[in-house]
Amino acid sequence: MKNIALGRYVPYDSFLHRLDPRTKLLSLIALMIMIFFKFSSTAMNFFIYALLLIFIYVLMRISHIKLKTLFKSLKAMWVMILFLLIINVLMPSTGPYFDIFGFKLYHNAIYNTLYIVIRLVMMIALTMILTTSTKPLDLTYALEWLLHPLKYIKVPVHEISMIISLALRFIPTLLEETERIMKAQSSRGVDFEQGKLKDKIRAIVSLIIPLFISAIQRSEELANAMEARGYDPSGQRTRYRKMQWQMKDALSLVFIVLLFGGMITLLVTSFDFFLMMGFVL
Amino acid sequence: MKAIEIENLSFSYTKDQEVLKQLNLEIELGSHVCIIGHNGSGKSTLAKLIIGLLEAKSGSIKVMENEVNEKNIHTIREKVGIVFQNPDNQFIGSTVRDDIAFGLENRRIPQEKMDDVIDEFSKKVGMFDFLDQEPSNLSGGQKQRVALAGVLAMNPDILILDEATAMLDPKGRKEILTLVSKMKGDNPNLTIISITHDIEEAYLASRVVVLSDGKIMFDGIPNEVFSHYEELLNIDLDIPFLVRLKRELKNKGIDLDDALNEEEVVRRLCQ
Ligand SMILES: Nc1ncnc2c1ncn2[C@@H]1O[C@H](COP(=O)(O)OP(=O)(O)OP(=O)(O)O)[C@@H](O)[C@H]1O
Ligand SMILES: [Mg+2]
């Protein structure tokens, strides 16, 4: 129950850990967009992907994520990759192909599958870097800051962010509770491990119902405690956690902007030195 | 001025069951009152009415001369702080620090001043070394100490403890009670209303109010209230061990009524 590793904050004193969560959120968004740029030639695409992959690997090193951790969370993707390959192969395409016993396996099909796989890997790695190096609560604050303008079109940004931070606060409590109820029900003879489907469903129900009842009761008590301590969602509040832009944030953002700008320039000018060197892929 | 004045207060959640029936109660400023009563006697309901989480059906509640109603709710919440029973369900912040800050944020205390307040009150409850801990790493007693710090940091005149020690082990319970006594020592003007099942705890108060079926059954100093032995047993209240012991000994012909504590009883029994 406790080893939901993906998306877990891992305390460490790294450069990325110390960056302002807003910097990290903005950079993540920029990088996510860059991942989906498509350049004029296949060679160019792979070249840019290679650069991005190296950059992401460096970020992983900085934030002390092991490649092993990344691969572990990619494990579940093999089925998906295979599925993507099959779809791409079956799609009609043009250009050069391998002839496998009369079946045309287009190079493009392989490239397209590779693109998607590489993008997925990069997206997962980037998300992992963000969540490993940023406390969930800080992320919530950053999100609230980012969505702040939506207040003017009457989106309850503060309430949403409060709900998220309370949910984050109560996840460990509810996990603990789940474990406790499971033990209690096991001691009453409920078997969570084996049995027929019918028994399994019954076991799950015996877990979910008490969990729900307790969660509802908790939320009521929580609301009371918050109100008693003067919380008023529509009222003005001060903020204990102030986010502070620092030099390293400015530098990081400048770097990301330059990277983004560079990519856009390459894209707009269709610059391609592989083509210029007469290398066609 | 009285801390609390309650007149003819009635309340019910559902039509068919009245939880509080024409209750009258006055609590002096700076006093330490303990409210006891069996399960479902309406103690928590009374606490929630005082702090304005519930609205009275009829009758009136005044907190330091402010009528509890929609209009005064901010004043009331400034004057009254409450610690509830479940340590987990009142821990709002993600760390000890953030939890104490929560009330201060609501009070619009400037951010620069918050750290001083947080340091001061976490030290008072002995949680200064745990400021950056998350609730899942704390014991129930520690969480209740944080809750106490969070409430006290808002500088209330009246502190309500609604079974704040009920879910703790004996050690945690003792810590909280010691802490409350210390707070009272530091600030004699603080009015404390402690709601409890733990009758040993009731002996800390200078006045005990027994609630039964939404009415006040007894009201007086602890020794006097607990002398109504049979009646208290009849409403399913636990009698303090010491009182029970003395009663049983008396039935056996050993009169130790003037013994003050367990040690003294033991000593005199051994003689
Ligand atoms: N939200 C509610 N809705 C309906 N009935 C309620 C609600 N809360 C409490 N009651 C009922 O009101 C009565 C008094 O409850 P209250 O919680 O005030 O008792 P209590 O003296 O605090 O008990 P305990 O010692 O168990 O905490 C009980 O009969 C209870 O069932
Ligand atoms: Mg209660």
Image: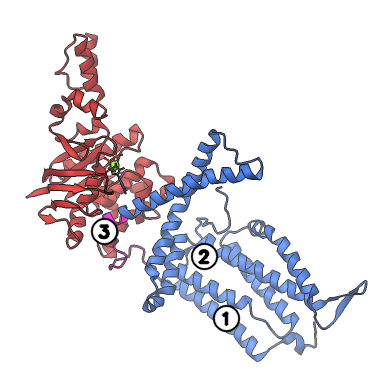
Chain colours: A blue, B red
Residue at disc 3, secondary structure: loop
Location of residue A88 by image quarter: bottom right
The lab-note entry on whether marks 2 and 1 share a chain reads yes
Q: Which residue is mark 2?
A: A16
Task: Answer above or below: position of A52 versus A163.
Answer: below
Query: For this rendering, which residue is in front, B173 or B254?
Result: B254
- Chain of residue at mark 2: A
Q: Quadrant of residue B138?
A: top left
Amino acid type, label 3: Gly
| Residue in the picture at 46% in, 65% down | A139
Q: Amino acid at mark 1?
A: Phe
Pick whichever of labels 3 and 1 is earlier in the sequence: 3
Residue A186 horizontal/vertical position (percent): 55, 36
Q: Which residues are magenta?
A: A225-242
Mark 2–mark 1 Cα distance, whole angstroms, equals 19 Å
Q: Which mark is first along the chain, 2 or 3?
A: 2
Of callouts 2 and 1, the N-terminal one: 2
The secondary structure that most of the magenta stretch takes on is loop
Q: Which residue is mark 3?
A: A230
Task: Look at the numbered discs 3 and 2 and tell me whether their residues touch, using CB distance below 8 Å.
Answer: no
In this orientation, does residue B262 appear? no
Q: Dot 1 corresponds to which residue?
A: A260
Q: Position of residue B144 (x, y in %)?
A: 32, 44
Q: Which mark is residue B119?
A: none
> How far apart are the two marked residues, 3 and 1, measured between alpha carbons?
45 Å
